[in-house]
Image (cartoon, grey):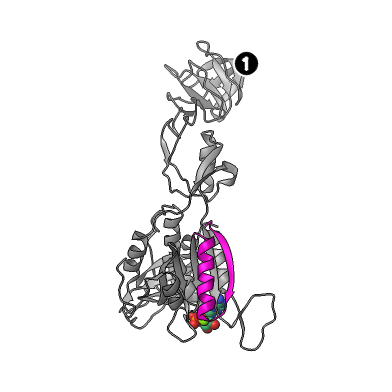
Amino acid sequence: MALSPSTTLTPIDQALTQILSGLSPVVGEETVSISAALHRVLAQDIRAPLAVPGYDNSAMDGYAINSRGLNAGAKFPISQRIPAGSVGQPLSADTAARIFTGAPMPSGADAVVMQENCHLEGETVVVEVPVRSGENVRRAGADVQQGELLFNAGHRLRAPDIGMLAGVGLQALTVRRPLRVAVLTTGNELVRPGQTLQAGQIYNSNFYTVSSLLQGLGHEVLDCGIVTDTLQATEQALLEAAQNADCIISSGGVSVGEEDHVRTALNNVGALSFWKLAIKPGKPFAFGTIANKAFFGLPGNPVSAFVNFVLVIRPALARLGGLIEPPTIPWHLPADFEMETTGVRQEYLRVRCLHSANSAPRLQLTGSQSSGVLSSVSHSDGLAIVPANTAVKRGDLLRFLPLSEIVGHS
Ligand code: AMP
Ligand code: MG
């Protein structure tokens, strides 16, 4: 893969195109019950084995009649009763069938008068309104036609999808196996929550952000622990991770300081296609392969790691996991702030979406935009994009990526 030299900044779209063009699905298939299929990725196209509804049926509680030549005020003796779940007899001429929502239409009837538009005189129903043929009848196949393509392979199943598949009688589905993603965090200063902090130490937050993002996207996490800042430990951790996972994500140690060993280690045990991305935050980022497994090296700063994950790793994992992502919705919302001209990097700002009774939603910064300040991500509704070399004036429309759309399904 031809990549730009490490000194130049690669625009995000170009980097993504290059990364994605080199990736294809790596996970096999398995069969799961539809009860366990939520958020799984279909491995095969799905066609409807039968139509929904399977037969013409009533959309209302009321009276099934033959509407031909009917005038308001017409009277019909009630000849049968058809609740949902049972099948009536052919409708005798000039009679009505008492019918309930979901019950099959009796042959000879072409419409249902809702009970609110009728009254009873003993065993006779009086229809108070004009009735059109087909009124309140749900036609066979109106929802789903037999043989219709319901989903393409690569679709991730959402709750109504599962219901629809159950509705056509499918009990088991062939889906992609989840991706097994190795996550290792580098940094001598890191300890896990639950341990006591010594002087100079911080809690490892990136592992938990990244593993939570992975879980939200339906991937399996392989916790490779905290790796000390030496070349040898980093090389060994990368090799082990590659043996046990479909792809590898590291955090930290990807810059150019003496304590940053990820790029050199990757060069030694795999292949590095490193570039710096023209985005802020999230400039340092390493991509490459170890034993033919994709490797993504996130920077250590928590917000840079988050932004890089959602912009680059999320779509890359989708490709590896066989998921065909629907295009993200291009929201554009007005800024409720001003900002000086950006530099050569496209900026991703943490914003909340402000709603008030009399105006359209507006974007407001959630606080410090420093790459180490994770609280302003946590308090945000999403990221607003400011292109390179652009100033923001109040009211300017900015592209907005809602977190709900970019961090997964749950
Ligand atoms: P690095 O990219 O390793 O130079 O780290 C940049 C900054 O991010 C430093 O302040 C690190 O302490 C911090 N950092 C690195 N890894 C983590 C992590 N897993 N959790 C929280 N902060 C981290
Ligand atoms: Mg470090």
Tell me where the magenta segment starts and ends, as one range.
Answer: 218-246
Q: Nearer the viewer, residue 220 or 165?
A: 220
Residue 256: x %, y % from top left: 42, 84
- Whether 122 is drawn above or below 344: the answer is above
Q: Quadrant of residue 69?
A: top left
Task: Check if residue 232 falls in the magenta segment.
Answer: yes
Outermost residue to the top? 93
| Residue 368 shows in this picture | no
Residue 136 drawn in magenta: no
User: Relative to 339, is 225 above or below?
Assistant: above
Quick one: 141 or 359, which is closer to the camera?
141
Q: Residue 249: x percent and y percent? A: 49, 68
Q: Say which residue label 1 marks.
A: 123
Give the residue at x 59% y 71%: 225
The residue type indicated by label 1 comes to Glu
Q: 267 or 180: which is nearer to us?
A: 267
